[in-house]
Structures are given as structure tokens and as C-alpha cells.
Image (cartoon, rainbow, N blue to C red):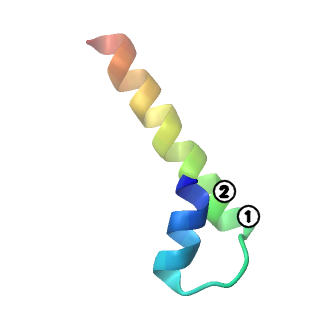
């Protein structure tokens, strides 16, 4: 869902690898922050 939202924000009609990579980076960051809390 995050990747789709990122694609929508850039005006892309389809998901690209960059959207997926960015979404995964956000998830990894959130996981690290949750583990630190």
C-alpha cells in the first residue's frame, strides 16, 4: 500500500522498483525504531 501511495504521489500509473524500494526502506526504518523503543 505504501508503494502504491508513493507511486500516486509521483503521478505514476504503475508501480516501479523505486517505489517498492522506498516503501521497504520506510518499513525497515519503522522496524528499527520500534525495536529501539
Classed neighbour count for the residue bearing mark 2: other residues with Cα under 10 Å, few (<14), some (14–19), many (≥20): some
Give me the residue at 73% from left, 70% from top. Answer: 16
Classed neighbour count for the residue bearing mark 1: other residues with Cα under 10 Å, few (<14), some (14–19), many (≥20): few
Disc number placed over residue 7 in the picture, else none:
none
x and y, in percent, of residue 3 in the image: 59, 59
Q: Which quadrant, please, contains the C terminus?
A: top left
Element assignment for label 2: helix
x and y, in percent, of residue 34 in the image: 35, 19
Residue to which mark 2 is pinned: 20
Pick the front one: 26 or 13: 13
Compared to 33, does 28 lie above or below? below
Give the total number of marks visible in the rendering.
Answer: 2
Give me the residue at 51% from left, 65% from top. Answer: 5
Mark 2 touches mark 1? (CB < 8 Å)? yes
Residue to which mark 1 is pinned: 17
- Quarter of the figure with residue 11: bottom right
Q: Give how far apart the Cα atoms at labels 2 and 1 are.
A: 5 Å
Locate residue 20 relative to residue 26 in the image: left or right: right
Amino acid at each position: 500500500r505504501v508503494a502504491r501511495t508513493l507511486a500516486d504521489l509521483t503521478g505514476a500509473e504503475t508501480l516501479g522498483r523505486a517505489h517498492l524500494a522506498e516503501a521497504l526502506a520506510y518499513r525497515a526504518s519503522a522496524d528499527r525504531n520500534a525495536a529501539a523503543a
